[in-house]
Image (spheres, grey):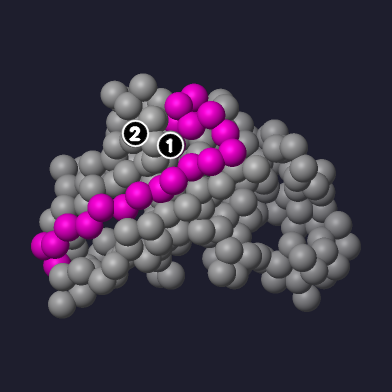
Amino acid sequence: QSALTQPASVSGSPGQSITISCTGTSSDVGSYNLVSWYQQHPGKAPKLIIYEDTKRPSGVSDHFSGSKSGNTASLTISGLQAEDEADYYCCSYARGDTWVFGGGTKVTVL
Amino acid sequence: QVQLVESGGAVVQPGGSLRLSCVASGFRFNGYVMHWVRQTPGKGLEWVAFIRPDEVRTSYAGSVEGRFTVSRDNSKNTLYMQMNSLRVDDTALYYCAKDLANGYSFEYWGQGTQVTVSS
């Protein structure tokens, strides 16, 4: 199972919106509405911020939003804040009860 | 609140074995799918294994299939990972993760336990 493809880095100024893409295949991202996104600050465990392509867990800020088209999922951070600076990973369920992660995207707030 | 505490990580030689444990609290352990996920600085996050609440259904990443075995003891609220025939590229921080109720994403994570495979 190949890793999902994410850009290595994305940057933006405070208040701007940025979008992180996550490209898979018809065997994972394109087959199921089961993409999730995780935020990870240095030295911390990952935190779930989006599940089932577009849903936010309770307590997660609504300036995070998820979408998907075909084999590509996207995470948008609206109104970028300093505390959004972190690594972001996408993950998709794939057939046979397996999961595949993206390589991660480092978000920098300029 | 949900807590997941991993232990058992160590430095081990190639070909060696380790058993990781993850003690869970703050939720009904026997009602949730559990996972192991590992992280290396160079490769990011990698899903490793999954086990259903009934302890019967499991699955593994191809990179560990046949070498790693996931299990759980619902009476002890504990998840395990038996790791055999360890290789240098198994070196990573190993997290246990509780699945969201939908069964397809990782809702809560422990702080991880470091496994280093080196001669």
Which quadrant of the figure contains the C terminus of chain A?
bottom right
Q: Residues within 10 Å of mark 1 (few under 14, many from 20)?
A: some
User: Gap between marks 1 and 2, in whole Å?
Assistant: 6 Å
Residue A67 among those drawn in magenta = no
- Indicate left or right for A28 with B109 as reference: left
Q: Which mark is residue B77?
A: 1
Name the amino acid, label 2: Asp
At 74% from the left and 62% from the top, the residue drawn is: A84
Question: CB atoms at circles 1 and 2 under 8 Å apart?
Answer: yes
At 39% from the left and 36% from the top, the residue drawn is: B76
Q: Position of residue A20 (x, y in %)?
A: 65, 54
Query: Which residue is farthest front?
Result: B76
Q: Position of residue B43 (x, y in %)?
A: 40, 63
At 37% from the left and 66% from the top, the residue drawn is: B114
Label 1 marks which chain's residue? B
Q: Position of residue B40 (x, y in %)?
A: 40, 65
Residue B32 among those drawn in magenta = yes
Q: Nearer the viewer, residue B49 or A94?
A: B49
The vertical placement of B5 against A33, above or below, is below
Secondary structure beneath dot 2 equals strand
The magenta region covers B14-34
* Residue B86 can be seen, yes or no: yes
The residue pinned by badge 2 equals: B73
At 43% from the left and 70% from the top, the residue drawn is: B41
Q: Position of residue B102 (x, y in %)?
A: 56, 26
